[in-house]
Amino acid sequence: MVSKIPGLYIHIPFCLSKCPYCDFYSSTSLSAIPDFLNALFKEMEMYRSRFNPFDSVYIGGGTPSLLSPEQLESILVRVRRNFNLISNPEITIETNPADLNRSFLDSMREIGINRINIGVQSFDEKVLSFLGRRHSVKKAISAVETSRKAGFCNIGLDLIYGVPEQNIDSWLDTLKQAVAFSPEHLSCYQLTLETKTPLGKRYQAGEFLIPGEALQYEFFMKTSEFLEDAGYLHYEVSNFARGTELASRHNQKYWDHSPYLGLGPAAHSFQDNRRWWNRRSIDQYITAINAGNLPVEEAETLAIEQLRLEALYLGLRTRKGLYLEEFKNQYHCDLLTEKKKMLDKLQEEGLISIQNGYLYPTQTGLAVADSLSLI
Ligand code: SF4
């Protein structure tokens, strides 16, 4: 494999309340935070000599902004003690607008966090209420403004579309409000309803409808067109940045088989064709670590065929696409000859392009990216 720089992910599995659509692993029992942190520090020691150096650290969750500045600082102190970081690492924290005030944000800057992701989700009060978010539009606005005043020059906003009764115009209003803050990064996710979540159950019980395929496509295309017109690069199905250098360094590792280490309950890791993931339970995670064991739930070694399929699936979700020569060397497959007929057809349909040695989806192709990987 081509050598790629690894990234470090730290999962903070706590939320003040559970949003009814959310399928991420988190608990509302905040009393477990001190024991969790002690276990996290031990887990870092267990991986001490592997994965060096990192060029990105991503503190995600859950809701990392629920931790105190002192707790977050202690995490980064332990990261630096146990691992090497390159001289200018990207260090991101995911936050809830409800937790952001000037003093917290000043502390985040002081401890070395240089990228802040804010879970705004919408600038429409009705949508926030449907999604069960614990912040208002007013609070979201002040969170973004205060982040800027605190000196953050790499701000990302998360937004959700495809919410029941939302129409294209109301979604475009949210996008207009978002770009008015000139965030460096925007993630626009389509609402997905996992069956086990409270909203998923209400949907299955027929309590509400979500936009059908045609309307979802329209949401996607309008989002892409609007944000590209506003100067954003649509660099992955759900992600937009004001230039390639502002694309999330960390998240790109998940799309190109770079190694990454995930610490904390339910976190996933990948290195040398091997993937493993931690126990999805704070108690089990702490118990395993306190017994001197890695808290790994399961691991798998991926065969070359699986890696190839993944690389195709993930690469065709990015605007950069796949570098064909590297793909051939890494996965032993010459797409240009082996898949010629299919590639010709997709090119005729305007879904992909092949230029300068890259195979990549067009803007329309990105909208149907999942089906492109079936070539
Ligand atoms: S705050 Fe984020 S992680 Fe927590 S429940 Fe809501 S969406 Fe999920």
Image: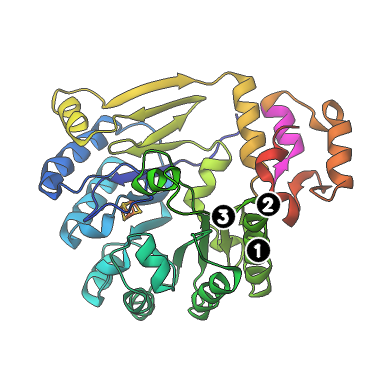
* 353 versus 144 height, above or below: above
Residue 105 figure quarter: bottom left
Q: Is mark 1 within 8 Å of ligand 1?
A: no
Q: Amino acid at mark 2?
A: Ala
Q: Nearer the viewer, residue 145 or 248?
A: 145
Q: With 295 as the anchor, is 3 left or right in this view? A: right
The answer to whether residue 116 of the structure is visible from this angle is no
Q: Is mark 2 within 8 Å of ligand 1?
A: no
Q: Looking at the magenta stretch, what is its main secondary structure?
A: helix
What residue occupies the far front of the structure in this picture? 206
Upstream in sequence: badge 3 or badge 1: 1
- Say the numbered circle drawn on residue 238: 3
Residue range corresponding to the magenta coloring: 320-330
Instruction: Name the residue tied to disc 1.
Output: 224
Q: With 199 as the anchor, is 312 left or right in this view? A: right
Q: Amino acid at mark 3?
A: Ser
Q: Position of residue 124 (x, y in %)?
A: 43, 73
| Mark 3 and mark 1: Cα distance apart in space | 9 Å
Secondary structure found at label 3: loop
Upstream in sequence: badge 1 or badge 2: 1
Q: With 267 as the anchor, is 311 left or right in this view? A: right
Tell whether label 2 touches label 1 (CB within 8 Å).
Answer: yes
Q: Nearer the viewer, residue 220 or 146?
A: 220
Q: Position of residue 139 (x, y in %)?
A: 31, 76
Upstream in sequence: badge 2 or badge 3: 3
| Mark 2 and mark 3: Cα distance apart in space | 10 Å
Q: Quadrant of the C terminus?
A: top right
Residue at (22% x, 58% y) in the render: 66
Q: Amino acid at mark 1?
A: Ser
Instruction: Name the residue tied to disc 2.
Output: 367
The answer to whether residue 331 of the structure is visible from this angle is yes
